[in-house]
């Protein structure tokens, strides 16, 4: 029977990590008969081999297992998966990562609708950097010539199996650095149509739990790493004959894989011997493989590194890294208010270098954005519009208004329940800084906004460290407590200045009247809400009530809160 997708999972001593990965794969919304899971064991010796056999025994129609001798690298297991796959498409997943529940259905739809050879699914990570700029919007029909696909070379993608076979795409069988980059540079050079899924998070890069480390946690051996990187450059030379286009490919590797290892905090954290060995190997690579005209393509803070490397000036590189490590963004909330269900946040930000205003003339590559970041999975979503960096004569500043619509902020969908941080993300001179918005004077009367549909409620609040965050659907703050705390007795009834609604609406609430002899009388009342606040008509009392309590009809509500 034909299958849509073969999920290929290389496995080696996965331990407790495999359980979460498998549960995510088996709970997909794509019907089970349309995809298979291939677990390729690279000679595990910690009991993982038995674990994957158990998964296959429990799900024999969907899970297939292949036991291989230990190769020491994920390339060979992935190649076995390619050979054994029966699906029209192959989705690569590492055994310590996971897919979100609708991931396979979403990436398959993107692949089929655009006849894509490769699909890049939107990722999130709780420990590693993600190039969020690639996932600003859904895209179809891309090639590396008209979009910077080379900025994503990690193997979390969906790829058409016939395309893989046609061009003989394989990972390196033996242990090799940047084997994923080698594979996908080759793939991009041939791909006629690449799609990007940006409207929902599909892939979760997760920090490895238990014994063992993620590969990125281990410093690379300079000789081996850059020897293998030269192999990637050889692939570019073979498949990109035009010199101008080839330089565009080279610039990414020069900026990220070469000079990026000599920049900012990583450069300063190396021990002396490792830093010297790394510099010497990079110096040789630059002298032999990086043509001088590449330096003109580099961003303004990266280009000086290239000159220092060509001048064989390691002390200068260290000083440059020390300077760049001080680049910070001081982003502050000037004011915050709700308007028609939209949260408007006025922001002032300034960029500092060595503690002083950054004197730099921004160019088209420099940009500042506002993003909301989920606390649970670190999913990052851009909030439009983006800001323009400018030099006001006293340094680089960013000023503007963030407008957050909780009903549409996740690529047109409502924000999901939980805690969300609001941050500013600035890219300047080839460096990226993401900082929380500092809210210096948060007041106690910040309004909660209620909605007729999802989300039900959004409360901006100030974190302990002073950052702006959003509490969606009463994740940590009881709505009852928040509403009752702001109650003010008026002539007509109780006024609640701490809560508004995105549009006129009414909410039924419960009132408990307590008499002097502690008898309780319950009445249902209507809370009227609009943009000006909330009003509760004071019902007629019964008996000699001494205290009044409020209860909202929210699931799992706390005890009723007393009204004045």
Image (cartoon, grey):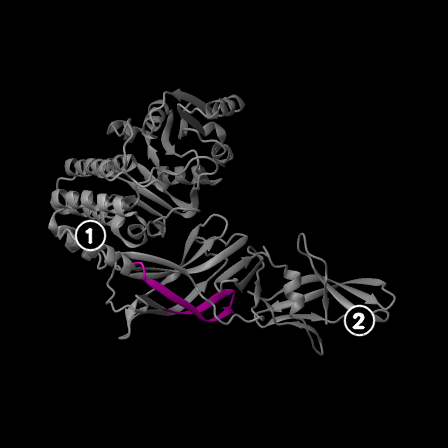
Residue 208 is left or right of residue 393, and the answer is: right
The mark lying in front, picked from 1 and 2, is 1
Q: What stretch is highlighted in magenta?
A: 325-349
Using the rendered image of the protein, determine whether residue 506 is visible from the camera's viewpoint: no
Categorize mark 2 by other alpha carbons within 10 Å: few (<14), some (14-19), many (20+). few
Disc ID at residue 540: 2
Residue 256 is left or right of residue 208, and the answer is: left
C-beta proximity under 8 Å, tags 1 and 2:
no
Name the quarter where the C terminus is drawn. Answer: bottom right
**Location of residue 2 (image quadrant):** top left
Percent coordinates x, y for residue 163 in the rendering: 28, 31
Whether residue 475 is in magenta: the answer is: no
In this figure, which residue is indicated by the disc labeled 1?
314
Q: Nearer the viewer, residue 530 or 67?
A: 67
Percent coordinates x, y for residue 108 in the rendering: 40, 37
**Location of residue 443 (image quadrant):** bottom right
Query: Image point 36% across, 31% down: which residue?
Result: 89
Residue farthest to the front, as pictured = 273
Specify which label sits upstream in the sequence, 1 or 2: 1
Disc ID at residue 275: none
Residue 415 is left or right of residue 8, and the answer is: right
SS label for mark 1: helix
Does residue 211 sit above or below 563 in this rendering?
Answer: above
Q: Nearer the viewer, residue 85 or 246?
A: 246
Residue farthest to the right, as pictured = 517
Residue 103 is left or right of residue 447, and the answer is: left
């Amino acid at each position: 029977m034909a299958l849509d997708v073969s999920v290929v999972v290389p496995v080696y001593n996965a331990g407790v990590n495999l359980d979460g990965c498998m549960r995510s794969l088996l709970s997909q919304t794509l019907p089970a008969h349309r995809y298979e899971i291939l677990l390729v064991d690279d000679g595990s010796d910690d009991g993982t081999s038995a674990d994957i056999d158990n998964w296959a025994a429990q799900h024999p129609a969907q899970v297939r297992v292949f036991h291989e001798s230990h190769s020491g690298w994920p390339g060979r297991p992935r190649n076995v998966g390619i050979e054994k796959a029966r699906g029209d498409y192959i989705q690569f997943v590492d055994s310590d990562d996971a897919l979100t529940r609708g991931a396979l259905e979403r990436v398959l739809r993107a692949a089929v609708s655009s006849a894509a050879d490769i699909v890049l699914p939107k990722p999130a990570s709780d420990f590693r950097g993600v190039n969020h700029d690639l996932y600003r919007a859904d895209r179809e029909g891309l090639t590396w010539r008209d979009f910077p696909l080379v900025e994503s070379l990690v193997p979390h993608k969906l790829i058409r199996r016939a395309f893989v076979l046609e061009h003989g795409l394989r990972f390196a069988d033996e242990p090799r650095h940047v084997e994923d980059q080698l594979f996908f540079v080759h793939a991009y050079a041939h791909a006629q149509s690449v799609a990007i899924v940006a409207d929902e998070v599909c892939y979760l890069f997760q920090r490895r739990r238990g014994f063992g480390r993620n590969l990125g946690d281990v410093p690379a051996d300079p000789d081996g790493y850059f020897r293998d990187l030269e192999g990637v450059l050889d692939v570019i030379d073979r498949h990109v004959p035009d010199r101008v286009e080839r330089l565009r490919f080279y610039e990414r590797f020069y900026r990220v894989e070469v000079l990026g290892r000599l920049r900012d905090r990583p450069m300063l954290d190396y021990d002396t011997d490792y830093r010297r060995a790394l510099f010497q190997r990079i110096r040789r690579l630059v002298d032999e493989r990086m043509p001088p005209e590449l330096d003109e393509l580099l961003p303004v803070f990266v280009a000086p590194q290239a000159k220092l490397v060509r001048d064989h000036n390691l002390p200068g590189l260290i000083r440059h890294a020390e300077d760049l490590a001080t680049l910070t963004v001081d982003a502050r909330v000037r004011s915050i208010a709700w308007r028609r269900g939209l949260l408007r946040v006025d922001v002032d930000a300034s960029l500092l270098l060595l503690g002083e205003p950054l004197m730099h003339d921004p160019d088209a590559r420099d940009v500042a954005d506002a993003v909301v970041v989920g606390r649970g999975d670190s999913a990052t979503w851009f909030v439009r519009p983006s800001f323009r960096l400018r030099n006001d004569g006293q340094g680089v500043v960013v000023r503007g208004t963030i407008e957050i619509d909780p009903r549409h902020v996740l690529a047109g969908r409502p924000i999901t329940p939980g805690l969300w941080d609001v941050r500013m993300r600035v890219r300047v001179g080839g460096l990226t800084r993401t900082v929380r918005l500092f809210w210096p004077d948060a007041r106690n009367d910040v309004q909660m906004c209620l909605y007729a549909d999802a989300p039900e409620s959004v409360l901006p609040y100030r974190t302990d460290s002073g950052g702006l965050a959003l509490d969606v659907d009463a994740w940590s703050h009881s709505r009852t407590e928040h509403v009752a705390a702001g109650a003010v007795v008026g002539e007509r009834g109780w006024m609640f200045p701490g809560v508004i609604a995105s549009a006129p609406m009414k909410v039924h609430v419960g009132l408990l009247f307590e008499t002097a002899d502690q008898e309780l009388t319950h009445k249902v009342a209507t809370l009227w809400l609009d943009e000006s606040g909330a009003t509760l008509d004071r019902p007629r009392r019964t008996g000699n009530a001494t205290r009044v309590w409020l209860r909202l009809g929210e699931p799992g509500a706390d005890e009723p809160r007393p009204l004045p």
